[in-house]
């Protein structure tokens, strides 16, 4: 059998926003990249028969099931892709690893450090038997972000002194927006912190190659009571009580915003802000890194660009320059369009599947590993503890010692 005939039969659990984003990537990855294995969209799983049947048809899956335990143990599934709310990541991923399936799990890896540790230990055990696992921090795969990492790793910024990261959204500013699962601690683990703060924690540790060693944090829940949802899907929802009756409400049990300062193990100082109350900011992730030899800036709203300041250039030529990251020799770009033809949000997921398929097919370990994601989970936990203790300085232990 030629290697390209090798098929990886994927089973996806979840079909909402992330399920759709991952489906798009599974559909596309082998049509764009030349890979040693072909992903087959074998099976999708969701609780509601009608909705999962519709999702299978709409998103391009061969079959559907309402039983994730069946999906993770079936002999005709090689890869399990977990796109459910955080409260089921650990259970599904652990069962899949135990059944010898390669696992891709959405971020944050889990709802607690304890779960993330169990998943990391199971992934390490399974790895010895050739089973691969990865966490879906998709923004690492935006070409400009990968290039940012490459610039820093090659020494172009010199010694990294500052990390400045924000991830801002505004989809729950309206106090009447319902209490969806992302606003419930038992389902999501935390609020803006884990949902979007996790991305900038991972992204900054990735691009700098440095680990966050301690934090001091504040968090806030601005709207503490919200109507219970009647219907919800992805980030859209409607409140109950639309028939004129006063809506039944429930308590928001997660943070709406988290702000913290941090130290990194290479000596850098960092600031982080994650909020769902930044009115007008829809999905605004921005990271600026300042080093002794230059600075680099990434802004997700202009994701095809990187701003670079090279302090080694002659004084008269200094200033931030805008690099359009669309050349064939930029990360991931050779398979897409001619130079200057930009890409979007969904491409980060296609790139994620590219790296995952390649790793599984070639028997190498993809990144971010579950251990990398545990490192993020340890930061989330430290931020929560620090905020609970009135911003007291809280150390973050290394995931692997
Ligand atoms: C919602 O805040 C969300 O969909 C996150 O869950 C994703 O991880 C992020 O990419 C976009 O926003």
Image (tube, rainbow, N blue to C red):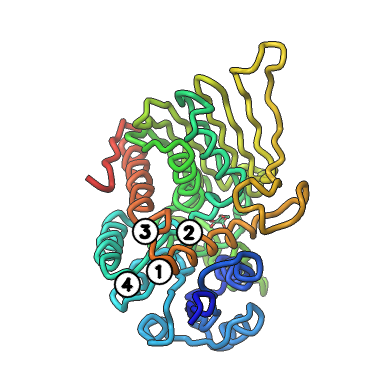
| Near-viewer residue (380 or 237) | 380
Cβ atoms under marks 4 and 1 closer than 8 Å: yes
Question: Can you give x and y, in whole percent of width and height, for residue 232 in the image?
Answer: 59, 70
**Quadrant observed for ligand 1 in the rendered image:** bottom right
For the residues labelled 2 and 1, the Cα–Cα distance comes to 10 Å
Q: Earlier in the sequence, mark 3 or mark 1?
A: 1
Q: Earlier in the sequence, mark 2 or mark 4?
A: 4
Mark 4 secondary-structure assignment: helix
Question: Can you give x and y, in whole percent of width and height, for residue 250 in the image?
Answer: 47, 62
Q: Which residue is mark 2?
A: 136
Cβ atoms under marks 3 and 1 closer than 8 Å: no
| Dot in front, 4 or 3 | 4
Check the image and name the residue furthest to the front.
Answer: 2
Mark 3 secondary-structure assignment: loop
| Near-viewer residue (54 or 218) | 54
Q: Which residue is mark 1?
A: 103
Residue 401 vertical placement versus 7 (above, below): above
For the residues labelled 4 and 1, the Cα–Cα distance comes to 7 Å
Cβ atoms under marks 2 and 1 closer than 8 Å: no
For the residues labelled 4 and 3, the Cα–Cα distance comes to 18 Å
Residue 67 vertical placement versus 221 (above, below): below
Q: Which residue is mark 3?
A: 111
Q: Is ligand 1 less than 8 Å from the beta carbon at label 3?
A: no
Q: Quadrant of the C terminus?
A: top left
């Amino acid at each position: 059998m030629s290697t390209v005939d090798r098929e990886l039969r994927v089973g996806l659990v979840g079909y909402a926003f992330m399920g759709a984003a991952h489906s798009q990537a599974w559909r596309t990855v082998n049509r764009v990249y030349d890979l040693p294995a072909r992903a087959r969209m074998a099976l999708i799983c969701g609780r509601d028969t009608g909705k999962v049947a519709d999702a299978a048809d709409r998103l391009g899956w061969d079959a559907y099931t309402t039983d994730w335990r069946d999906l993770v143990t079936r002999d005709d599934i090689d890869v399990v892709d977990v796109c459910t709310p955080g409260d089921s990541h650990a259970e599904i991923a652990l069962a899949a690893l135990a059944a010898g399936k390669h696992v891709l799990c959405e971020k944050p890896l889990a709802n607690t450090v304890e779960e993330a540790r169990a998943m990391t230990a199971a992934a390490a055990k399974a790895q010895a038997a050739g089973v691969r696992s990865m966490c879906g921090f998709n923004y690492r795969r935006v070409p400009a972000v990968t290039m940012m990492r490459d610039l820093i790793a090659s020494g172009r910024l010199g010694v990294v002194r500052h990390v400045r990261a924000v991830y801002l959204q505004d989809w729950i500013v309206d106090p009447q927006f319902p209490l969806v699962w992302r606003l419930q601690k038992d389902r999501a683990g935390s609020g803006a912190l884990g949902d979007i703060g996790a991305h900038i924690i991972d992204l900054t540790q990735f691009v700098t190659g440095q680990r966050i060693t301690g934090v001091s944090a504040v968090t806030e829940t601005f709207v503490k009571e919200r109507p219970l949802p009647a219907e919800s899907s992805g980030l859209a929802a409607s409140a109950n009580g639309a028939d004129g009756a006063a809506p039944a409400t429930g308590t928001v049990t997660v943070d709406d915003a988290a702000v913290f300062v941090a130290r990194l193990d290479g000596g850098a100082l960092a600031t982080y802000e994650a909020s769902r109350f930044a009115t007008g900011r829809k999905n605004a992730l921005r990271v600026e890194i300042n080093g002794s030899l230059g600075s680099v800036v990434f802004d997700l709203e202009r994701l095809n660009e990187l701003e670079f300041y090279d302090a080694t250039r002659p004084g008269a030529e200094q200033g931030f320059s805008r690099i359009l990251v669309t050349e064939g020799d930029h990360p991931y770009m050779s398979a897409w369009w001619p130079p200057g033809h930009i890409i979007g949000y969904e491409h980060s997921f296609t790139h994620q599947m590219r790296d995952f398929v390649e790793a599984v097919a070639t028997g190498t370990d993809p990144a971010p590993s579950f251990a990398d994601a545990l490192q993020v989970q340890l930061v989330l936990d430290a931020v929560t503890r620090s905020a609970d203790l009135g911003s007291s300085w809280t150390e973050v232990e290394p995931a692997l010692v």
